[in-house]
Structures are given as C-alpha cells and as structure tokens.
C-alpha cells in the first residue's frame, strides 16, 4: 500500500529530535512539504529539515503554549506553501517527580507543553482547515501524540499522565467538532520509545521491568510511531477519526496471561 502526501503541507511540533524528527522525515518521504517546529534546538531542527528531501522543508521556532508562536508557525506554513493540510501535535515534556513533590509551577509547565499546546495548535489550525474546506473542499487533519500513560495512569509522572489523558479527550472532542468541516482528528498512544525522553525514564526505572511490561518484548523506535502518523495523516485513513492508535508493543493489554 503506497502512502502519498504529495502536494500536502504539514506542521510537526517538537520535530527537532526524537519522535517528532522521525515523523517529519516520514511525512517528507511520502512527498509532503514539512515545517519542522522546535522549541530551543535550532541546529537540530535544521538538520532534520535538511534530511526531509521528499518535498520542501523549513524550520520555525515555536513554544506550543504561546498563542502568538502558534499563529506565527501556522502563518509560516500557509505563506510558504499556500495551504495547510496536516498538523502533528507531537511536542511534549516529561519530568518524573513523586506525586507529593510536584510543585504548582511544574504542574503548569507540564500542562502547558503537553495539553495547552495541543489545544492552541488545534484551535488555530482547525480554523484554517475549516476555511480551506469551505473555499475548496478537503479540510485537513490532525494527529495528536498522547501516551500509554494517558490511558493507564502512571505513578512516576501523574501530572504528565493527566495531561496526556486530556489530549485523548481533546482528540475525541475536536474530531466531533471539526468533522462537519471535513477535518479528521486522531491520536497515537506510544509506549516506551527510544528517545531522549526514554533516557530520562530509564534513569529512574529498571530496563528489565520495562521490557517485562511489553508483550512484544522490545522498546519501540521513533520510526514505529512515524509510520503510524504517516498513515493517519494520509487519505488511506480517510474514514478514521476520533481514534487512539496504540503503538506500544501490546503494553496496553495489561499484565494478564
Ligand atoms: N519517548 C517515549 O517513550 C514516549 C512515550 C509516550 C509518548 N511520548 C510522546 O511523544 C512525543 C515526542 O516525545 P519524544 O520522546 O520524541 O520527546 P523528546 O525526545 O524529549 O523531544 C521533545 C520535543 O518536544 C519539543 N518541546 C518540548 N517542550 C516544548 C514546548 N513547550 N514547546 C514546543 N516544543 C517543545 C522539544 O523541542 P527542543 O528540542 O527544541 O527542546 C523536542 O523537539 C511527546 O509528546 C511525548 O510525550 C513519548
């Protein structure tokens, strides 16, 4: 099955490294023009953009919890490519902290990066998608990156898990709200994926414990999530909306035999 995103324009948040970088590269390999958004690592983002050779590519600095930054990034896409088709809300922030030690400030930063950012990007992009749909048909789509923690809860970062649960709810709400405008909204719930975030996780958790929780017996790679994102962003998924796709090696099945 070929996935073609030719002539489509995408914005991927948190694309300077990890899963976001792999998603930017996968969308590009399918022919999309890709805006590689980053928070602080400009050089890494430039490297990712340079490896996006399937279509055009560019970078934009963007704090996802800033409405001004979000509007500027979406403008950058429409100005450069004339239209906007795919938003991937990938940017995320995890700091494992015991429940009793989570400060108000850390709660706020975690919600801002993981949930408020998805809200702002979806609201701003959703309006562009809806007006494109009214003008020429074909509204666009959103892929949100949540987490298995948002589905199962988590003892090591309950604030992060709560934000990711919020992303699942927002995915379902926006899928309903934007469907009349021809816009699909889906989410991917990764399990453990080898990135900088995973390195933070294994600093506090035994790898053998992690592997024991994964029926397929291996930690995922950024490409595992990127392939799923390319599919959901494509017309091959044109009848799928409001779905949460598990990319976790079977982790969400639980521990039973
Ligand atoms: N890795 C896993 O095991 C795992 C599991 C489940 C879900 N996820 C989710 O998958 C997504 C990607 O994770 P990852 O493992 O690739 O993470 P990562 O390696 O830590 O990369 C995080 C990315 O998000 C960007 N970012 C962080 N805070 C931001 C903010 N406030 N505004 C804008 N950009 C921000 C970073 O930009 P800079 O590089 O410029 O700082 C970076 O590009 C996240 O939503 C994460 O929660 C990951």
Image (tube, helix red, strand yellow):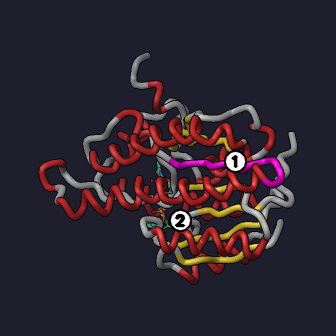
Question: Disc 1 beta carbon < 8 A from ligand 1?
Answer: no
Image-based side of 231 in relation to 171, left or right: right
Quadrant of residue 210 in the image?
Answer: top left
Q: Nearer the viewer, mark 2 or mark 1?
A: 2
Q: Secondary structure at mark 2?
A: loop
Q: Is residue 230 above or below residue 211?
A: below
Residue 227's disc number: 1
Question: Disc 2 beta carbon < 8 A from ligand 1?
Answer: yes
- In the rendered image, is residue 12 in sight? yes
Q: Secondary structure at mark 1?
A: helix
Mark 2 to mark 1 CA distance (whole Å): 17 Å
Q: Is residue 100 above or below residue 239?
A: below
x and y percentages locating residue 216 in the rendered image: 55, 33
Residue 145's disc number: none
The residue carrying pointer 1 sits among few (fewer than 14), some (14 to 19) or many (20 or more) residues within 10 Å by Cα, namely some
Q: Which of these two is toward me, 100 or 112?
A: 112
CB under 8 Å between discs 2 and 1: no
Residue 250 lies in the magenta-colored region = no
The residue carrying pointer 2 sits among few (fewer than 14), some (14 to 19) or many (20 or more) residues within 10 Å by Cα, namely many
Q: Residue at x 34, y 55 (%)?
A: 111
Which residue in the structure is indicated by mark 2? 14
Q: Which of these two is toward me, 13 or 139?
A: 139
x and y percentages locating residue 233 in the rendered image: 71, 47
């Amino acid at each position: 099955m070929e996935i073609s995103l030719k002539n489509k324009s995408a914005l991927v948040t948190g694309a300077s490294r990890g899963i976001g970088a792999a998603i930017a590269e996968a969308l590009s390999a399918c022919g999309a023009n890709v805006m590689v958004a980053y928070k602080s690592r400009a050089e890494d983002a430039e490297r990712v953009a340079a490896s996006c050779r399937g279509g055009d590519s560019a970078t934009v600095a963007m704090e996802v919890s800033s409405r001004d930054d979000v509007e500027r990034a979406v403008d950058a896409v429409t100005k450069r490519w004339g239209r906007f088709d795919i938003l991937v809300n990938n940017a995320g922030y995890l700091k494992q902290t015991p429940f009793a030690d989570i400060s108000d400030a850390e709660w706020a930063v975690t919600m801002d990066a993981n949930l408020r950012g998805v809200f702002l990007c979806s609201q701003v992009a959703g309006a562009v998608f809806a007006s494109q749909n009214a003008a020429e048909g074909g509204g666009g789509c959103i892929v949100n990156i949540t987490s298995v923690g948002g589905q199962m809860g988590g003892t090591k970062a309950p604030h992060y898990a709560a934000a990711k649960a919020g992303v699942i709810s927002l995915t379902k709400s926006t899928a309903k709200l934007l469907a009349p405008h021809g816009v699909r909204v889906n989410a991917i719930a990764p399990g453990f994926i080898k990135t900088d975030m995973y390195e933070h996780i294994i600093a506090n958790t035994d790898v053998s414990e992690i592997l024991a929780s994964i029926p397929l017996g291996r930690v995922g790679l950024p490409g595992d999530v990127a392939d799923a994102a390319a599919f959901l962003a494509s017309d091959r998924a044109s009848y799928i909306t409001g779905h949460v796709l598990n990319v976790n090696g079977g982790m969400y099945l639980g521990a039973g035999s």
